[in-house]
Amino acid sequence: MESIAVGKCIHLLSRIEDKALDRFWQDTSAGKYPIIDLEGNMGYSLSDQDGLLFVRNDFTASTYEDCEFVFGNLFLPDTVQELLSRDKVLILMVYRKTTRNLLLSELEADARYMLDLPHGLYSFFVLVLDAGAKDLLDSRIYAVGLPCKENLNRPELEKFYLEHPADIREFVDSAPIDIKRGGPFYLNLIMIDAEKIPDCPMLFSEFLQEDEPSPPL
């Protein structure tokens, strides 16, 4: 189920103008922390003195929509930390169900991030990709970050994960997240080695060769 949802978002990338997507990927590889939406609008994340990365969303939200802050962090088990190096990048994907819009942003592995999102149902993913790929759609997928059922930054839960790395259903909550009045919201994403996810393609091109998943009835 999780790989299908990620695949849907990857299929949406083909709707972004090639020139805009190329610029986003070049700036990502250069560590400039760019942001892009399906319309090809681009911006750049801002970082405060405490290292909090603010993922701007001001080119996608209407001035008439109520928004809420979403604070996020990544849970990186040792098995995934070993995959991270200077030639890897982390891309956050935020899919808004009602508008079918997609927001992409570069993240730092060890930094918290914040978004300002209009009310609605959202899916969140993070991908660890090969920064040396010629373009985004040619990248290799090394790990996938999926929403957790609870905060995993506790030693006993990390120990259980390391002992049962394939049993991801114990940790992942695949349901869309309802961002509504009453925020802020806190999002924990668990990073999972892509090889540990059943039927998860390792390349963007493999996702794109598959039929795009149909929306649920």
Image: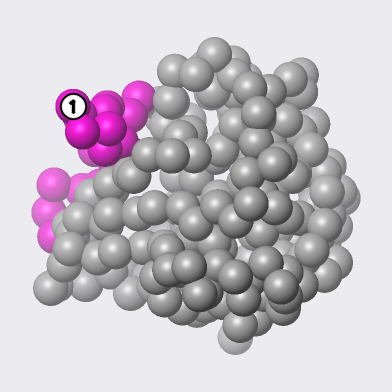
Residue interval drawn in magenta: 44-66
Q: Is residue 60 magenta?
A: yes
Viewer can see residue 97 = no
Quadrant of the drawing holding the C terminus: bottom right
Q: Is residue 196 left or right of residue 39?
A: right
In percent of width and height, residue 93 lies at 51, 49
Figure quadrant of the N terminus: bottom right
Question: Residue 69 at what x, y percent from top left?
Answer: 20, 55
Residue placed at 39% from the left, 53% from the top? 73
Taking 9 as reference, is 193 left or right? right
Question: Is the magenta region chiefly helix, strand or loop?
Answer: loop
Foreground: 56 or 148? 148
Residue type indicated by callout 1: Gln
* Extreme-bottom residue of the structure: 217
| Secondary-structure class at tag 1 | loop
Residue shown at the point (46%, 53%) measured from the top left: 74
- Residue 106 position (above or below residue 193): above
What residue does disc 1 label?
A: 49
Q: Is residue 149 above or below residue 36?
A: below
Figure check: 28 above or below 124? above
How many residues crowd mark 1 within 10 Å: few (<14), some (14–19), many (20+)? few
